[in-house]
Image (cartoon, rainbow, N blue to C red):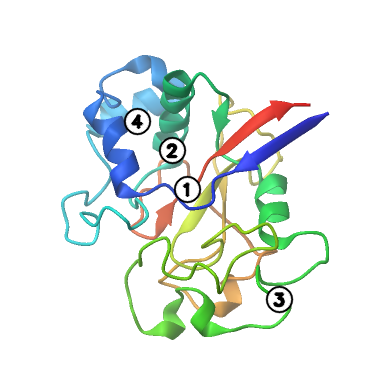
């Protein structure tokens, strides 16, 4: 039986800094073939706008990371922890956010703008990953699954493959962000971007996969 444990919070800038400081952008072994090509062609050494004030807050989610960088982080973390760490696939992400009762938002069936960071809050930037803990949590106690940052999933948007080594034009993003309104922040809404996209509203969380 296959199961998974999903991270309670999105990966923060402090956590991602450990990947950078350990030489993550210099080691080809962490990257997919296509990801390493983009890393070299575009001279990536850190996330986009890594040095701006928003990204320097350790408790905020890391932003400006492509799908390739998120996958490389997972591969590196798997080695560091000796565990199988990946991006969630789309089904895992939705189940962790929604539970089993078909709700539209992690907390309930109805929208509450003070339960997550979308454009309705007027904050207009990311917030600490624990800011909405205890309000907007999913049925499993997972925090910040809508709003704040779009979260990369392993899944190919068009064909549904979860193979990270397969070339893809579009990879799935879920959950909405600080930059968009509530219409895009429900748990069943699917978005996507090219895997080399590095927007300041895109981050990720990880899963630990296991066989029971």
Q: Nearer the viewer, residue 116 or 124?
A: 116
Where residue 48 appears, as percent x and y from the top left, is: 26, 48
Q: How far apart are the alpha carbons under marks 1 and 4?
A: 19 Å
Quadrant in the picture for residue 97 = bottom right
Q: Nearer the viewer, mark 2 or mark 4?
A: 2
Q: Nearer the viewer, mark 4 or mark 3?
A: 3
Q: Residue at x 82, y 60 (%)?
A: 100
Q: Is the C-beta separation of discs 2 and 1 under 8 Å? A: yes
Q: How far apart are the alpha carbons under marks 2 and 4?
A: 13 Å
Quadrant in the picture for residue 140 = bottom right
Q: Nearer the viewer, mark 2 or mark 3?
A: 3
For marks 4 and 3, the one nearer the N-term is: 4
Q: Is the C-beta separation of discs 1 and 4 under 8 Å? A: no
Q: Which residue is mark 1?
A: 204
At mark 4, the secondary structure is helix
For marks 1 and 4, the one nearer the N-term is: 4
Quadrant in the picture for residue 210 = top right
Quick one: label 4, few (<14), some, or many (20+) residues within 10 Å? some
Q: How far apart are the alpha carbons under marks 2 and 3?
A: 29 Å
> Residue 38: which disc?
4
Q: Nearer the viewer, residue 2 or 42?
A: 2
Q: Which residue is mark 2?
A: 70
Where residue 80 appears, as percent x and y from the top left, is: 41, 21
> Residue 108: which disc?
3
Quadrant of the snapshot with the N terminus? top right
Quadrant of the snapshot with the C terminus? top right
User: Is residue 24 at all visible to an observer of this figure?
Assistant: yes
Point out the residue furthest to the top here: 29
Quick one: label 3, few (<14), some, or many (20+) residues within 10 Å? some
């Amino acid at each position: 039986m296959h199961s998974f444990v999903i991270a309670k919070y999105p990966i923060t800038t402090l956590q991602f800094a450990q990947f950078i400081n350990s030489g993550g952008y210099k080691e080809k072994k962490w990257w997919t073939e296509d990801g390493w090509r983009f890393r070299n062609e575009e001279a990536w050494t850190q996330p986009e706008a890594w040095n701006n004030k928003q990204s320097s807050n350790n408790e905020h989610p890391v932003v400006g990371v492509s799908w390739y960088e998120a996958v490389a982080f997972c591969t590196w973390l798997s080695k560091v922890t000796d565990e199988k760490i990946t991006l969630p696939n789309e089904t895992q992400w939705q189940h962790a956010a929604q539970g089993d009762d078909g709700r539209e938002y992690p907390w309930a069936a109805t929208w509450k703008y003070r339960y997550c960071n979308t454009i309705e809050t007027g904050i207009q930037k990311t917030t600490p990953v624990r800011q909405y803990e205890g309000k907007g949590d999913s049925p499993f106690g997972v925090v910040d699954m809508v709003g704040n940052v779009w979260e990369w999933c392993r899944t190919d948007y068009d064909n549904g493959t979860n193979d990270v080594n397969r070339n893809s034009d579009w990879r799935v993003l879920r959950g909405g962000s600080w930059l968009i309104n509530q219409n895009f922040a429900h748990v069943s809404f699917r978005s996507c971007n090219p895997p080399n996209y590095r927007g300041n509203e895109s981050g990720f969380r990880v899963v630990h996969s296991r066989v029971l």
